[in-house]
Every structure is written in structure tokens, then in C-alpha cells.
Amino acid sequence: MKAKVLKKHAVATKDVKIVYLTAAGLKSLQEEYDILVSDKRPSVATRIQKAREYGDLSENAEYAEAKDEQSFIEGRILELDQILQNIQIIQQSDDNGIVQIGSTVTIHLNGKDDKFTIVGAQEANPREKRISHESPLGKALLGQKIGSTVQVEAPIGMIAYKIVSVQ
């Protein structure tokens, strides 16, 4: 499936939520979609057909398991289809030190620097220091510039982060 890339100034309607992705994130989701549609969907259909041949479906564990897997695969295909219909690729630009989606930001807290990349929610992975633009820290950083201090509400109270660099 080819993804429809929305124009930079596209506006999400109530029913459509724009999904921000890097080019690598888009490639990864397209590969997952292709594997589900071309490999896993036919494989589980074959499993269901073989399980039907075993007889009574009400007590057929193989059939029930295959139907559960089919349900999961079809749900994920629908989810990916929706995502891929409403994406906007994150473009790297000369941001003049302003934090935006796609920026790698170095922040300072308690004598220590930490670096995060602001990404769309689909690609967020805190372990890899990739935070969503929808997260509290991501929201606070967006639109800020080098030298700014942002306040983020955390379970332990307000935390102040100073922006050291933006790439």
C-alpha cells in the first residue's frame, strides 16, 4: 500500500488525526503492512481451513487459536491502513534553534545533560530517547528555543528543564 502524504498545511478534521512519521518510521509501517497482507493473512487462512477439516468447530482448539490470530491480524491491518492514510512526513529543516517535531534536543536538569528526539506518537520509544510530541515533555519543548527553560508537571511536582541545544 502506498501512503498518502498530507500537505504540510493539512488540517485534521474531527474524524481524521494526522500521524507524524519520519521517513524511516513510514518505511517500517509499510513493511509491517505488506508482511501482514501478503504473508500472515494467507498463512492464517490456510491454518483455519486445515483446522476446519478436523471436524467439530466448537471443541477445536486449533480453529479457535487460528481465528483469534486472524482477528488480531485483521485489526492491525485496519489500524495500519488508517495510519497510512493520514500521515505527514517529518521534514528536517533549518529551524534556527526552535524545537519542532523531528528535532533532537539536549536539555539540562540537575547538573546533567540528556538528549531526546521529538517524534510522532507512533515512533515514540523512551528507551531510545525518542519522545512523542504529545507527551508532557514533548509538548513543553515544542516551539521553544535554545536557552529557554520549560516547566513540566510530573508526579513529584514541577520539573524545570533548560534547553541546551537543538539539532
Image (tube, grey):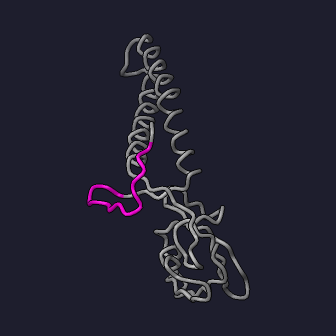
Q: Nearer the viewer, residue 25 or 114?
A: 25
Q: In the picture shown, does residue 157 fall above or below 35? A: below
Marker count (numbered) = 0
Task: Residue at 60%, 85% (x, y): give it.
Answer: 161
Q: In the picture shown, does residue 89 fall above or below 63? A: below
User: Looking at the rendering, in which quadrant would you find the C terminus?
Assistant: bottom right
Give the quadrant of residue 147.
bottom right
> In this rendering, would 133 be left or right of 6?
right
User: Residue 59 in magenta?
Assistant: no
Which stretch is magenta?
3-17
Task: Residue at 58%, 78% (x, y): give it.
Answer: 96
Q: Residue furthest left?
A: 14
Task: Residue at 42%, 38% (x, y): give it.
Answer: 77
Give percent across and percent down for residue 22: 55, 56
Q: In the picture shown, does residue 124 fall above or below 108? A: above
User: Looking at the rendering, in which quadrant would you find the N terminus?
Assistant: top left
Main secondary structure found in the magenta portion = loop
